[in-house]
Image: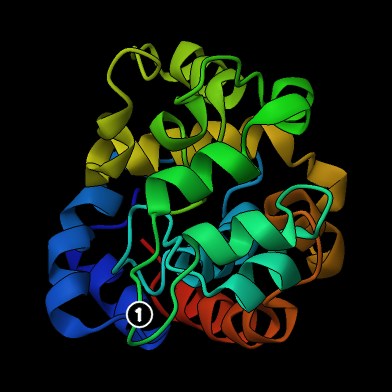
Amino acid sequence: MSRTAVHWLRILQACGVARATAERWADVFADEVKDGTFSKGDADLGDFLPNILHEAMMLERMEENLNYTPEGLLATFGAARITPAQAQAVGRIPGKQAADQRAIANIVYGGEWGRKRLGNVAPNDGWTYRGRGPIGITGLDNYRRVGDLIGQNLVGIPDLLSQPRFALDACIAWWEDRIPDNMLGETTAIRKRVNGGTLGLAEVQALTIKAKAALEANHA
């Protein structure tokens, strides 16, 4: 039998999600995560939960935060994707200028890099298809692919990925599409697939311990 909202409330709180946020999401998890939702059940969930909780700041953030300083832009994306001059022009400079997040997205997710890796071709695609949802789905091609998987027009209505039920449904579809069963338990490999590197690895490893214990303690 699938876990109830009460189970999910306990699981999310045990992982560190604030109670009010856990209460908003518990019904969503109970409705979306059923027996057979994941190919390997709790083996998937034990890796899935820590990654989405970390990426979404414990389910508090459904859209990518691009409020970078010039230094942060260069450290995160590199000079090959945003030049020092561009970073200085659009980055947040305390006491002087706010970050131009739209311009940042269009620079770092646009150009030749964005076309080849994300399918972004129009001038505003970087911003339109910026990271959304708990897993941070990014880029036109990924919006189209996941939208096809869940039967929703994410390309035409990208804000659906900021709404909890669509967001979780999309994350699950992305996970089942991109994380093979033989990768489960390989936290470092999964982080590279989710985030492109090992950023947040230590935090996800700590969350994995909590998530697996919480899932074990809250069987359906």
Horizontal and vertical percent position of residue 135 = 51, 51
Q: Nearer the viewer, residue 207 or 195?
A: 195
Q: Quadrant of residue 58?
A: bottom left
Colour approach in the figure: rainbow
Residue 132 visible in the shown view: no
Residue 187 visible in the shown view: yes
Q: Nearer the viewer, residue 104 or 192?
A: 104
Q: What residue is shown at x 42% (from left), y 64% (from top)?
A: 56
Q: Amino acid at mark 1?
A: Lys
Q: Quadrant of residue 118?
A: top right
- Left/right of residue 104 with respect to residue 60 in the rendered view: right
Few, some or many residues within 10 Å of mark 1 (<14, 14–19, 20+): few
Q: Nearer the viewer, residue 92 or 204?
A: 92
Residue 68 in the image: above or below residue 134: below
Residue 29 in the image: above or below residue 21: above
- Left/right of residue 20 with respect to residue 136 in the rendered view: left
Horizontal and vertical percent position of residue 179 = 74, 42
- Left/right of residue 19 with respect to residue 152 in the rendered view: left
Q: Secondary structure at mark 1?
A: loop
Q: What residue is shown at x 40% (from left), y 53% (from top)?
A: 101
Q: Quadrant of residue 119?
A: top right
Q: What residue is shown at x 27% (from left), y 69% (from top)?
A: 7
Of the 4 image quadrants, the one containing the C terminus is bottom left
Horizontal and vertical percent position of residue 61 = 32, 63
Horizontal and vertical percent position of residue 143 = 49, 24
What residue is shown with label 1? Answer: 96
Q: What residue is shown at x 48% (from left), y 41% (from top)?
A: 171
- Left/right of residue 20 with respect to residue 62 in the rendered view: left
